[in-house]
Amino acid sequence: MLSGCTRREPKADLRILNGPEIQSLDPHIITGQADMRVVLSLFEGLTRFSPLNGDGIPAIAERWDISPNGKTYIFHLRTNAAWSTGDPITAEDFVFSWRRALDARTGGDYAALLFYIKNGEEFNTGKIKDPSELGAKALDAHTLRVELKNPTPFLLELCASPALAVVPKPAIERYGDKWVQLRPFPCSGAYTLEFWRLNDRARVRKNPHYWDATNTELELVDFIPCDSANTAINIYATGHADVLWDKNLLPTDLLDVLRRRPDCHSYDYLGTYFIRFNVTRKPFTDPRVRKALALAVDKERIVKRITRGGEKSASHLTPDGMANYQPPDGLGYDPDAARRLLRDAGYPNGKDFPRFQFLFNPGPANQQIGVELQAMWRTELGLEMDLRQAEQKVFFDDQSKLNYDVCRSSWIGDYKDPNTFLDIFISNSGNNRTGWASPSYDALIAQANAEPNAAKRAKLLEQAEILLVRDDLPIFPLYFYSGLVLFDTNHWDGIGLQGNLVDQHNVNFIKRKKSVVRRPLSVVHGVERPADDGQRTTDN
């Protein structure tokens, strides 16, 4: 993990414990939050996320004009926006990038984020072959016209997401998918890629050609992968990392201690932990079976015994805090009703129900939750389930290919609107990963997206969510996330937590407050004590 220190490389200005190993640097195909943290330092879109509230604020576009009907945006690009090569970033680069993100051959799971653009979905699904019909056109080198299907109040937040980031046309046209292997790596963001070494770190260096380089303070930033919570907390406690930015890296048995520390910060964000069913595999093709399993789960037991980080149990998918929307309640905890449903489905007391598997990715909480589900379903329903852990890349691949029975899942909202959760379960969404396709659900989402009246739109979205979490149940929510991150507020500024519900943090906003000598600590069996090597570390 820290083997780079023996290569006499300079110490990074900021070292982030980032969670699982990243899978790609291509903004248009990444899915994991760890990947997004790195990619958002390397690539930028028309807007970027505000560290204060997660809104879309000016980035490569310095300003924009919006038509009275809310369906046309004219983006004015900065004349000093440039690639890391020094070449200018143009409006035509965005046209190319968005067409690529929508191209089915790219295989991006987030392509649906561009379906709000005129003919975006039609181009993605092949109904329209001519990419010039997409509602994104370069009027000149620094002016981009975007036409939408319907008014999209969260468009500026969409434009800050990696799926809408600008990517290098010459490199992609010449090298295809292998463009991400180019060194130097062509970037559009605040940083360039210094190196990415598996099982070591991804290091980024300040991009001198970035339009806001003057206000980008940190020269070198390391993103350190780590799957072990115990390892991560010791790396942080001994001063070898400045930020521990993945809650899964906090040992659950130490949460009570850690949450009392001044460098442990709790915050709300748009995140839901839920369970997916593969509805194409029997017996999970039957909604009664899916409902039975959901009703037999005591969610309060999970958040109190396992997560223990202030999470709230969930019966609906969309977290609270969305503008103009009150989510509907889904199913609660009712083992008697669960047993009746299972009996009606032909499996009284679990008789003849096939043994099945629960798929999960690395992380102590994931495994513990699997063990709890295993025990609940055995006790309440007489079902036998095996646990199957898969490393991150295999896990997402198996989800996408529907190579599972039941699996753990989570979703972090991309913008502060119910669509960011509900859109992922439309039939043709690459993030659906359940095999569930409901024409009724698709129609409700489409109607909501076209509805200008906020109250009527909210009602349509509520009806869709009822289908999702109460009637058809291709998924069932377990709990809403509560974020925890470790860093010293006396040392670091620009990490906005409270109010930043999208939980996106561009590292170019982070600044050093002052040089602080921090005595390394080791954490052993929940007890903090000075490290026994006698060394002192300075963060400089």
Image: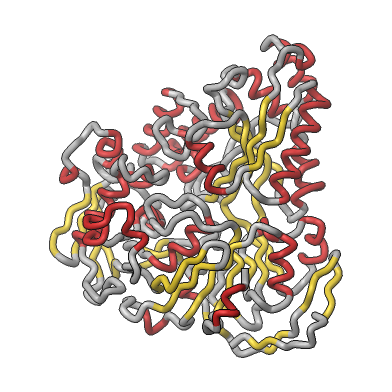
User: What is the x, y in percent for residue 427?
Assistant: 42, 30
User: What is the x, y in percent for residue 242?
Assistant: 63, 75
Split into 4 quadrants, where in the image is the N terminus?
bottom right
In this picture, residue 391 sits left or right of residue 83: right
Quarter residue 11 falls in? bottom right
Residue lying at 78% horizontally and 60% vertically, measured from the top left: 255
Residue lying at 86% horizontally and 70% vertically, measured from the top left: 527
Find the residue positioned furthest to the front.
7
Residue lying at 40% horizontally and 73% vertically, measured from the top left: 191
Quarter residue 47 falls in? bottom left
Note whether 401 is above or below 528 in the view shown: above
In this picture, residue 297 sits left or right of residue 241: right
User: What is the x, y in percent for residue 330?
Assistant: 64, 32
In this picture, residue 57 sits left or right of residue 259: left
Find the residue positioned furthest to the left.
140
Q: How many marks?
A: 0
Q: How does the figure colour the protein chain or chains?
A: secondary structure
Quarter residue 236 falls in? bottom right
Note whether 247 is above or below 317 in the view shown: below
In this picture, residue 123 sits left or right of residue 159: left
Residue lying at 70% horizontally and 26% vertically, measured from the top left: 293
Split into 4 quadrants, where in the image is the C terminus?
bottom right
Note whether 83 is above or below 21 in the view shown: below
Q: Is residue 101 visible?
A: yes
- Using the image as rendered, state which of residue 47 and residue 192 is in the foreground: 192
- Using the image as rendered, state which of residue 294 and residue 83 is in the foreground: 83
Q: Is residue 65 visible?
A: no
- Using the image as rendered, state which of residue 53 and residue 48 is in the foreground: 48
- Using the image as rendered, state which of residue 401 and residue 139 is in the foreground: 401
User: What is the x, y in percent for residue 29?
Assistant: 40, 50
